[in-house]
Amino acid sequence: MSAGELAGRIAVVTGAGKGMGPAIAETLAREGADLMFGGRDMTALAAVADSIRAIGRRAAVVRCDVSEPADVDAMVAETLQAFGGRIDILVNAAGGTGPVEKSTIDTDPGDFDDIVKVNMKGCYLTIRAVLPTMMAQRYGKIVNVGGSWGLRGRALRMSYSATKWGLRGIMKSVALEAGPYNVNVNNVCPGIVEGPRFENTLKVKSVRLGRTVEDLRRESAEDYALRRFSTAQDVANVIAFLCGDRSRQITGQDIAVDGGWVI
């Protein structure tokens, strides 16, 4: 394949096996990056890795629970060994939804802890693990998948919203610490993204309200300026941009990819 903007770059992508992950991985690969995938579903990750190799890029897979420091450190060590001692890009796409359609009162404390571990602690651990390499080579791009509910509050999704707000604090603090070493750190904040997670939320909401999924989908779309939801590819395109050098002066920012919900 012809060289793209990310030719020669080494990228670590968490959560590549599901959701937006495959689209993110393929988009980075088509721009020339070689990739290490970390996650828990090895079957799904292996399938993504095979698709990346099929378009001519290198891909490796390692089992990693991003909320476990030892797993994260091992993933980074394996990446450095497999790809010549460099890590140029980290994309934190691993994440969970947390309690859906539940009030703060009804949210179980254990469920709250679980989503904080994945959506906040997981990103902190991966960033912490790659920073020494990026700072030493004086180059790095870190992109976290945040969310538009980290830019506005959301009733009945308190725990999820809280983690995405918390991720903003992590991102902005790290951007200030890493900036002198030529490391950019940003969040991409999708709105509703077409896919199984959104469909599940609609079903839960449909049961709670006694309304059809079709009516709820149409009503949700009307909240967006463009009257449509994002796709995984919409989000992947912006992530790829932030991983390249055309975005060299963008750091510490929350970039909404939401069709005009947070305006």
Image (tube, helix red, strand yellow):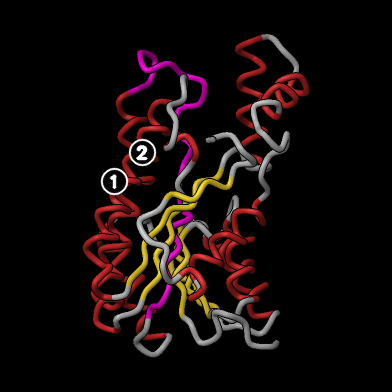
Per the image, the residue denoted by label 2 is 165
Per the rendered image, the range of residues in magenta is: 87-108
Label 2: which secondary element: helix
Per the image, the residue denoted by label 1 is 169
Q: Are marks 2 and 1 in contact (CB under 8 Å)?
A: yes
- Quadrant for residue 62, please give it: bottom left
- Quadrant for residue 74, please give it: bottom left
> Around disc 1, counting alpha carbons within 10 Å, would you say few (fewer than 14), some (14 to 19), or many (20 or more)?
some
Label 1: which secondary element: helix
Instruction: Classify 25 as above or below 65.
Output: below
- Quadrant for residue 199, please give it: top right
- Residue at (72, 26) in percent of width and height: 217
Query: Horizontally, is 175 left or right of 256 in the view?
Result: left
Is residue 20 magenta-colored?
Answer: no
- Residue at (58, 68) in percent of width and height: 46
Residues 108 and 86: in front is: 86
Query: Horizontally, is 52 left or right of 167 in the view?
Result: right
Instruction: Classify 242 as above or below 203.
Output: below
